[in-house]
Amino acid sequence: MSYILLLNVISSFLFVYILLVTIRIIFTWFKPEVDGKPWHYLCLITGRYLAMFRGIKGLRKGVFDFSPVLAISILFFVQQVIDRVIFYLRTMGKFSLGIGLSVLFSSLWNSIFWISIFFGILCIIRFYNIFFHRTPDADIMGTIDLALQPMVAFVMKFLPRKCEYPKLLFVSILFLATILLLGSLFVYYLGRLLVSLPI
């Protein structure tokens, strides 16, 4: 079995496992009463992996648990590394130190990128809810506020004065969009530079 075929098999396995973990998390958040054999097997397959992250300090903010986000991010990072290694082996027929560094930086950035997109979506949902005076489930909005609290507190440090929560959410959305744009450009050009290294 060639290296590329083996890496493809591992990448496919990780893709399926990420999907299973995501389904488990979504059902746990929104359908906590789910039961039955399929649910039992899903918990059996994903439970041990997710349990590895539950005890990490700082990942729980009130009722919101960030450990599944970290668990998926690590799986996604590993899959990205493997996919990029496959890409360079196929296109360039070699693997160097520069390519390895490019793979690591771009894969790490992709994980950060999707976590940022997740928080951006939460910001947009909350901003939309406040701006258009919707009356949704208070528990869901409270959970979103708890999830956004660390990011909003971070953004507040850069503001000259305190502002209302809707404005703070809007600034947070702009902040995330700017970071994602500048970060993507930086990682793109850094990746090209690293790939061109002779080592």
Image (cartoon, rainbow, N blue to C red):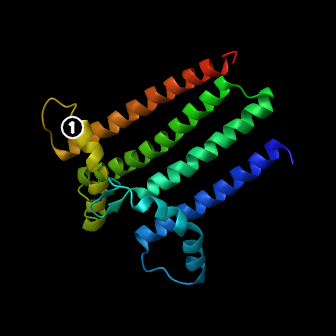
Nearer to us in this view, 162 or 104? 104
Nearer to us in this view, 73 or 142? 73
Q: Residue at x 69, y 50 (%)?
A: 11
Q: Residue at x 45, y 54 (%)?
A: 69
Direction left: furthest residue: 161
**Where residue 49 appears, x then y in whole percent?**
54, 62
Crowding at mark 1 (Cα within 10 Å: few <14, some 14-19, many 20+): some
> Is residue 150 something one can see in this rendering?
yes
Residue 106 image-quadrant placement: top right
**Where residue 90 appears, x then y in whole percent?**
79, 34
The reply, left or right, for residue 159 in relation to residue 151 is left
The reply, left or right, for residue 189 in relation to residue 94 is left
Direction right: furthest residue: 1
Determine the secondary structure under disc 1.
helix
| Residue with the mark numbered 1 | 156
**Where residue 32 appears, x then y in whole percent?**
42, 76
**Where residue 164 appears, x then y in whole percent?**
15, 43
In the image, what residue type sits under mark 1? Met
